[in-house]
Amino acid sequence: MTIQDRGDIVAGSLPPDAAHDTDKALVLAPIERDAPKAVKEPFRPIKVIGPIAVFGLMMGTWYGARLLLAPYKRFVLPPPHRIITKAFLFETKDGVPVIRNAVFKATWLDIKVAVVGLSIAIVLGVLTAVVMSMAKWLEFSLWPYLVALQAIPILTVSPLIGAVMGYSQAPRILVTVIITIFPILSNTLFGITGVDPGFHDLFTLHGSSRWTRLTKLQLPAASPAVFAGFRISAGLAVIGAIVGDVFFRAGEAGLGQQVDVYNSRLNGPATWACIVMAAVLGLAFFAFFAVLESVVVGRWNTTKR
Amino acid sequence: MSVPQISFNDVSRVFPDGTHAVDNVSFSVAAEEFVSIIGPSGCGKSTLLKMASGLMDITGGSIDVDRSSIGYVFQDATLLPFRTVQRNVELFAELHKMPRAEATRLAAEAIELVGLRGFEKKFPKSLSGGMKMRASLARSLTLNPKVFLFDEPFGAIDEITRDRLNTELMQLFVRNQFAGLFITHSISEAVYLSTRVLVMSARPGRLIAEFAVPFEYPRTESIRYTPEFARLTGAVNDALHSAYVTTASASPQARVAVGGAR
């Protein structure tokens, strides 16, 4: 369809007269019919070359820095290739090389704790925020304690949680929930309550119920803020899973315990393998929610991160 | 003249802080009538519409109108950013629990009427200001209201687009024959669109002048350049200037403001 056609539709529904000819001329001139186009940023080679160069520089520094250490200290900084071969790929068992899986097992445990903890925090956080947005008295009553919960350094509480709940999965999950729930809850709450009053007027004019308002206006409008909360908490969930593990020093070993064990055995490559896995895990969680966010709200959201 | 669709009977509004926004305003708008209200900023023009629609309480007098058949177009297009044009235009039908197919049909019709066909799947972020306003108009058109309230809908739109939208709105008015009540700051817009132009004084807002506009509908752009049009806009302009002066002698607050400006 051409621009001309659209002009005809408006004019065509009514008796034609001289003015419509002038109108058509105006329609043809791209004054306001041209919607702002999404400008696609051109590809720039530096976006690929830059990070690769920095990676090379870091690796070079690593190998170099290693040589600056006294020989008996060099175990703390094993060369990167040895981390891969010694800690991830093989270990020799009775002279036969097998895939080493202690680090992967520990990682898998942390993944489970982080996923379960984060899921609970998402459900609990979003629900609490919705309830708080509907009952102001509840918001006023609970808010100080939520801020306090957020302010308490989790390291100080973890040993107590372990002592009370034992060293199974449950206390680790609890630690994860405690440190991930606040960003989700506060972002959801601000998103829901921060909806433009003009939109509320629309729904008021058409006699909408609270539920309609919540589901058709507030929650969709809040979704960018909600997803921002998820993203922040995703990174925290990995930290929560590991922190719980470090402090309990008991039960099935996650990355937190493993890194401690390897370090005390002066096993440099394995120590670093744990660090690498923890970093990969944090990134993966963050990336998952970043992608989910762009799929769900990316098409319409106007605020750029 | 047919039966009034909306009547303001001695309507007053005093805000909780004691500000007297609107004072004893009486007028009515019949079907097939388009009335514009023009007046200084803050004179309570928008307050009139908010009271008529029920968004704001009336503190004195009464307004007779069928609230179930009001279309209300704000200065801001208020399109939900997370809905496409099509879904935005469907919103009101959806809120009134109409069947999905009916909502879709009404929306398609309204979208065609405002010239937005081809843009149904776009999100508001990729529309220009004028297109957003068309979508907003379409949304209200779906329910085919008997009374249409416009609160400076084209205030933030450039003049060329505004003139176009004026013509299109006038055509919609001729086609749907609603009772239109239009708030604006633009004298020529008011005269071009309306059967009557009312002038309001500065706070507390009172009606101080009324002009009948004799041009036949549908009007064409060319009437803007006739001597009669110029004479009318001139007269409205004079009344609008006296709006400031009259109030200065009527209200102590306004006098202070004028005195301070000297």
Image (tube, coloured by chain):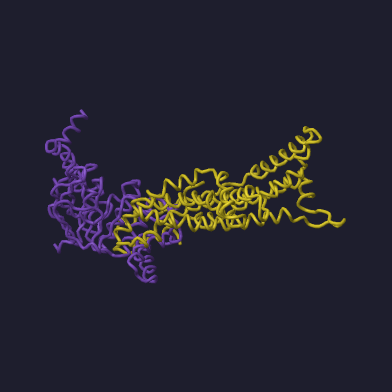
**Rendered location of residue A236, percent (x, y):** 57, 48
Q: Which chain is yellow?
A: A
Determine the residue positioned at 25% across, 58% down.
Answer: B148
Determine the residue positioned at 75% across, 40% down.
Answer: A76
Residue placed furthest toward the right: A95
Relative to residue A163, is residue B41 depicted above or below?
A: above
Q: Report the quarter where the N terminus of chain B lies.
A: bottom left
**Rendered location of residue A123, percent (x, y):** 49, 58
Determine the residue positioned at 42% across, 45% down.
Answer: A144
Q: Is residue B242 left or right of residue A198?
A: left
**Between A268 and B201, which is closer to the camera in this rendering?**
A268
**Between B106 and A272, which is closer to the camera in this rendering?**
A272
Q: Report the quarter where the C terminus of chain B lies.
A: top left
Q: Is residue B31 left or right of residue B108?
A: left
Relative to residue A110, is residue A61 depicted above or below?
A: above
**Rendered location of residue B184, percent (x, y):** 25, 48
Residue placed furthest toward the top: B262
Q: Colour of chain B?
A: purple
* Residue B114 in sight from this viewpoint: yes
Residue B237 occupies which quadrant of the picture? top left
Q: Is residue B39 left or right of residue A292?
A: left
* Residue A6 in sight from this viewpoint: no
**Between B163 and A245, which is closer to the camera in this rendering?**
A245
**Between A188 and A138, which is closer to the camera in this rendering?**
A138
**Rendered location of residue A42, percent (x, y):** 59, 46
